[in-house]
């Protein structure tokens, strides 16, 4: 995602925390629907926009400064 490659994954626990279907990647409901999801992705005209959203998601969610702030906030919450 950091290089602008939208992720294709199945709908497993936790994936919705990182991937938003048709916004920054693609989520297939199960393994049987992966091929259909790939074809849907290939036919989209806004792949550049999805690629840019993937990059922004990584920058926002996994940036070291943002991650550090979130971790400090978490530790403050559980220690009070």
Image (spheres, rainbow, N blue to C red):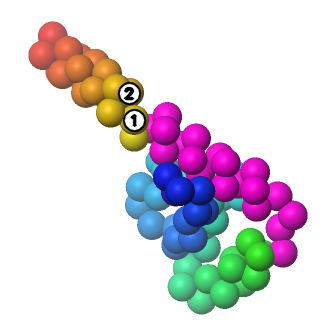
Residue at 69% in and 79% down:
38
Q: Among all residues in the image, which is located at the extreme left?
A: 79
Badge 2 is on which residue? 66
Magenta span contains residue 22? no
Q: Among all residues in the image, which is located at the extreme top?
A: 80
Element under disc 2: helix
Reply above or below: 26 against 63.
Answer: below
The quadrant holding residue 79 is top left
Per the model, the C-alpha gap separating discs 2 and 1 is 5 Å
Badge 1 is on which residue? 63
Reply above or below: 64 against 5.
Answer: above
Left or right: where does residue 50 sit relative to residue 58? right
Magenta span contains residue 56? yes
Which residue is at the front of the view, 59 or 41?
59
The answer to whether the residue labelled 2 contacts the one labelled 1, judged by CB atoms less than 8 Å apart, is yes
The quadrant holding residue 4 is bottom right
Reply above or below: 38 against 3.
Answer: below
Magenta residue span: 43-61
Answer few, some or many: residues within 10 Å of disc 2's Cα (few below 14, many 20 plus, some between 14 and 19).
few
Q: Is residue 70 visible?
A: no
Left or right: where does residue 16 sit relative to residue 14? right
**Secondary structure mainly formed by the magenta segment:** helix
Left or right: where does residue 69 sit relative to residue 15? left
């Amino acid at each position: 995602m950091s290089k602008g490659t939208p992720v294709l994954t199945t709908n497993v626990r936790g994936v919705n925390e990182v991937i938003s279907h048709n916004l920054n990647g693609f989520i297939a409901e199960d393994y049987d629907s992966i091929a259909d999801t790939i074809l849907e992705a290939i036919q989209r005209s806004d792949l550049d926009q999805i690629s840019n959203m993937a990059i922004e998601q990584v920058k926002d969610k996994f940036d070291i400064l943002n991650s550090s702030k979130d971790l400090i906030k978490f530790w403050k919450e559980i220690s009070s």
